[in-house]
Image: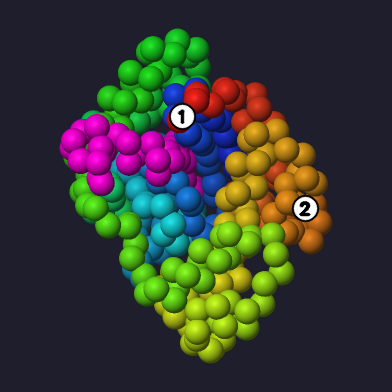
């Protein structure tokens, strides 16, 4: 086992945009199927990562980028015995849409990644330097200028712009997903979801998993963890976040959080609290 060599260091740069950053190294940790509400832009700095995404296996190594659109299910594990290290960015969908609108001049612009493993050494180094700058500097003009320069390059080089939702799904799946998100803390049953979208429990469970990569219960649990990150970053106590989001208790939140992120809620909160900023109005 190599647990002693693993680390996950989070910080936020919310004075510039809703943006979480991560500097991490994993060896033994395996990420179960999960998703982010934000875009994922990771630059690999050591070793290699293997993951499943869109029904296929992928692998990326040092100097390459792993990018994933919001809401898309993926896994993560070491691609070699020594593990993998990366610097990650999780920009909000709102920030990326606004940037796409500014670049394209289209009010309906929705950017999406065309591929998941990117070979762009220049951009990888730019992201690496941006990560270091955001972590170390308090010069807002410098930080914000670098953020827009690098993510403009990400968008212009590797994203397409459409006017439709990123991942269109059958209406029944969309309605079930929206219901779960709107009533996240409630103890909804599969029968209640199925009745709401006029499907049998069996067919809803099968269609939901087929289209989203997770059954309703796993998707709800992942969304609870994602929302917990937001509340913890805002200063909520883990016990308060657990109660707000429908976890059985704080221990249940801790298990789910550690399984998804490799750290406890308290450790995550300490990390983002050590380098957090007040969100700019309208960001």
Residue drawn at the location 62% of the way across and 44% of the way down:
229
Q: Do the residues labelled 2 and 1 touch (CB within 8 Å)?
A: no
Residue drawn at the location 62% of the way across and 83% of the way down:
191
- Side (left or right) of 166 relative to 105: right
Give the residues drawn in magenta, as a range: 82-109
Rendering coords of residue 223 (x, y %) = 57, 57
Residue 116 in view, yes or no: yes
Position of 213 relative to 149 (above/below) = below
Rendering coords of residue 243 (x, y %) = 77, 53
Q: Residues within 10 Å of mark 2 (few under 14, many from 20)?
A: some
Q: Name the residue under label 2.
A: 243
The number of numbered discs placed on residues in the rendered structure image is 2
> In the image, which disc is placed on residue 282?
1
**Considering the image in quadrants, where does the C terminus appear?**
top left
Colouring scheme, one of rainbow, by chain, secondary structure, one colour: rainbow
Along the line of sight, which residue is nearer the eye, 187 or 52? 187
């Amino acid at each position: 086992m190599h647990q002693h060599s693993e680390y996950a260091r989070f910080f936020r740069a919310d004075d510039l945009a809703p943006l979480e950053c991560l500097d991490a190294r994993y060896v033994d940790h395996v990420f179960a199927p999960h998703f982010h509400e934000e875009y994922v832009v990771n630059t690999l700095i050591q070793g290699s990562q293997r993951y499943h995404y869109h029904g296929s296996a992928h692998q990326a190594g040092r100097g390459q980028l792993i990018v994933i659109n919001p809401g898309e299910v993926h896994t993560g594990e070491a691609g070699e015995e020594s593990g993998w290290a990366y610097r990650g960015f999780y920009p909000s969908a709102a920030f990326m849409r606004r940037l796409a609108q500014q670049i394209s001049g289209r009010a309906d612009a929705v950017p999406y990644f065309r591929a998941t493993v990117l070979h762009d050494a220049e951009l990888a180094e730019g992201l690496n330097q941006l990560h270091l700058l955001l972590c170390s500097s308090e010069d807002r003009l410098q930080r914000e200028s670098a953020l827009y320069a690098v993510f403009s390059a990400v968008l212009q080089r590797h994203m397409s712009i459409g006017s439709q939702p990123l991942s269109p799904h059958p209406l029944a799946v969309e309605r079930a997903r929206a219901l779960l998100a709107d009533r996240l803390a409630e103890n909804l049953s599969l029968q209640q979801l199925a009745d709401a979208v006029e499907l049998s429990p069996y067919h809803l469970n099968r269609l939901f998993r087929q289209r989203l990569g997770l059954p309703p219960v796993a998707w709800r649990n992942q969304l609870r963890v994602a929302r917990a990150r937001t509340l913890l970053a805002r200063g909520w106590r883990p016990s308060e976040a657990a109660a707000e989001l429908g976890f059985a208790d704080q221990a249940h939140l801790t298990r789910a959080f550690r399984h998804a992120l490799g750290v406890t809620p308290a450790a995550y909160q300490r990390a983002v609290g050590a380098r957090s900023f007040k969100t700019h109005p309208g960001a």
